[in-house]
Image (tube, rainbow, N blue to C red):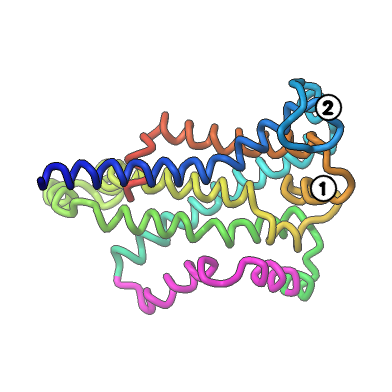
Amino acid sequence: MAARLSGGGGALTYFLAAAGLIFIVSPLVVVVALSFSEASIATYPPVGFTTAWYQRVIVDDEFRQAFLTSVTLALASTVASFVLGLPAAYALNRWEVPGARTIETILLSPFILPILITGLALLQFMALLRMRDALTNLFIGHVLITLPYLVRTVTASLKQVDRSLEEAALTLGASPWRVFWRVTAPQITPGIAAGCLFAFMVSFDDFPISFWLSNAENMPLPIYLQNSMTKVFDPSIATMSSFTIMTGILAVIGLEKLVGLRRAMSV
């Protein structure tokens, strides 16, 4: 009897998980399907099958510029968040830093504050300082919202590190720097990879911060998509969105190849 209940519970769990997965993935499938429609407007179910919209989007200079801007901005903000977040998380976790809890709360505050309000506050702050370089402003804004992901995942990974291995290495004469690179770093690599993935995708797909800080010359892809939808809603919009979806899929595949997706998501 207990086995039956256990089996039934397992089946129900798998069914609910599958239903949730279908619910989440279905909108993405619809978007991709629309990108191959022969109709001149976006209608579902799609009419016919064509790759003409992909050809049209690929040769669009404005789309390529927006896509390149988003990729460059996401990579730059991810690298900056890694450079700042790794030592910050390590110091807060391992050293007796005065006001460590307060500092950690400040670093993680973008998780709590409404992102649209954060963007508006950044705009007012940068206008006050007369910072008129839109690309620099976008970079600062994106680092602000991606840094918490590195701090959070690295902190979680550091709490799972086997401290006895570090102590053994120190006892055997290894320097603290060598202990970090040879003992600690390999154990927190999944957390670093997960944080970088989250940071890249948050930056690449960000709309609220980019909405306030971008301009006509430096326009990330989400803003370009929003502007395009206000003009005409044809399958080319779905095609551009499909490129965004494929970028996210490639990022996840890259994480899987580098450190293993299950290891990275286990932090």
Percent x, y of residue 73? 66, 47
Can you identify the residue that label 2 sits on?
56
Q: Judge by depth and name the residue closer to the eye, 146 or 21.
A: 21
Determine if the magenta segment contains residue 102. Answer: yes
Q: Amino acid at mark 2?
A: Arg
How would you classify the magenta stretch by its main secondary structure?
Answer: helix
- Mark 2 vs mark 1, CA separation in Å: 16 Å
Q: Judge by depth and name the residue closer to the eye, 150 or 237.
A: 237
Mark carried by residue 120 = none
Which residue is at a point 38% across and 46% down the rendered structure image? 16
Q: Judge by depth and name the residue closer to the eye, 253 or 162.
A: 253
Residue 42 is left or right of residue 102, and the answer is right
Determine if the magenta segment contains residue 117. Answer: yes
Residue 245 lies, with reference to residue 209, above or below; the image says above
SS at mark 2?
Answer: helix
Residue 115 is left or right of residue 226, and the answer is left
Residue 90 lies, with reference to residue 46, above or below; the image says below
Percent x, y of residue 265? 37, 45
| Nearest to N terminus: mark 2 or mark 1 | 2
For the N terminus, the image quarter is top left
Which residue is at a point 75% across and 53% down the rendered structure image? 135
Residue lying at the far right in this picture: please name it: 231
Q: Which residues are magenta?
A: 96-124
Residue 256 lies, with reference to residue 114, above or below; the image says above
Can you identify the residue that label 1 sits on?
229
Percent x, y of residue 131? 78, 65
Quadrant position of residue 31? top right
Quadrant position of residue 247? top right
